[in-house]
Amino acid sequence: MKPVGKVLCATGIVAGFLAFFWKDPFNPESLSGARVLLTGASAGIGEQMAYHYARFGAEIVLTARREAVLQKVRTSLYEGRHRRFGLLPKQQQQISCQHDKFSFGTVEQNQLRGLDYLVLNHIGVTRFQMWAGDVEYTRWLMQVNFFSYVALATAALPTLEKNKGSLVVVSSLIGKIPTPFTTSYSATKFALDGFFSSLRHELIMQKRNVSITLCILGLIDTDAALENIRGKVHLTASPAPEAALAIISGGAMRMQEVFYPWWLQYTCCLWVLFPYNRDQVLQSYYNYSSP
């Protein structure tokens, strides 16, 4: 067996043992009464997070750009006999497009009376295609996917520090490993990793008691993701409810990074350790026919 094969085999065995013996220390009761602001909550992973937080007894405020879809989430929560939540449908537009003017004052006074968790999950419409030179779209996507995260986190830090709270940032494997068809989206996710990983260092050095959890997700079976990749990617999508639970538990345990599925952590390690031929392996999972 070649050296690379031996390393891969050993890595797989170690990963298998860790997965078998690992005991999840997450305690759902720790979220009872927790005050949570969740962005991008109208569908997909954000919607599933809303249901989990409600089930765990958290007080949640949900935001989304699509008010009609968000109302459906509200109906589902009411049907599940969950009452400790609020909606800020119009605020999401301000979060995404006028992030420099956003204030947590209204949220604190009228909805949560404080903040324990800020969960940043919203994204702009993603184009899954070859780079076509649209700089304006990339600039817009950076504003929605990155600059709004920075602005919201900056506005929330004083309140989170006062409450020894947590900042949860939903990112992607594409922010660790660049892939085809995702030039603009990948740029926004790499930016998130760089900014919030650096900010985490600074908060620790300043002894400010705010945790930052960066969530690195693989392909998830949301409607939007499956529609984007149809006919282009040879990968199996993971379930959104489990991804949402991984994000929530990681934030509650104040982990620095969460990988879902769990084996993505080893994928990132192998990507760094074996730079040769890795591009060919990655590209083999994508389908592209030259025009």
Image (cartoon, rainbow, N blue to C red):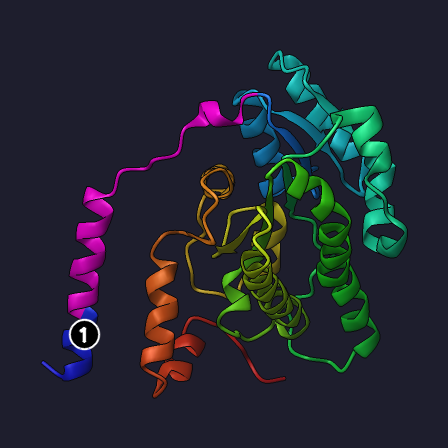
Name the image quarter holding residue 64. top right
Instruction: Name the amino acid, label 1.
Output: Val
Q: Residue at (26%, 38%) from the top-left corner?
A: 23
Identify whether 281 is placed above or below 144.
Answer: below
In the image: residue 15, left or right of residue 276: left
Q: Position of residue 197 (x, y in %)?
A: 55, 63
Identify whether 18 is placed above or below 10.
Answer: above
Q: Residue at (32%, 82%) from the top-left corner?
A: 274
In the image: residue 83, left or right of residue 208: right
Q: Does the magenta stretch include residue 209?
A: no
Q: Where is residue 163 in the image (x, y as percent from the top left)?
A: 64, 35
Magenta part of the chain: 9-32
Q: Where is residue 109 in the image (x, y as percent from the top left)?
A: 83, 27
Name the image quarter holding residue 273. bottom left
Relative depth, front residue between 207 and 100: 207
- Residue extending farthest to the left is 1
Q: Can residue 275 be seen in this view?
A: yes
- Residue extending farthest to the top is 81
Q: Residue at (73%, 80%) from the top-left corner?
A: 132
Main secondary structure type of the part rendered in magenta: helix
Name the image quarter holding residue 126. bottom right
Q: Can residue 232 be seen in this view?
A: no
Q: Residue at (20%, 80%) from the top-left corner?
A: 4
Which quadrant is home to the N terminus?
bottom left
Q: Is residue 26 magenta?
A: yes
Residue annotated with mark 1: 7
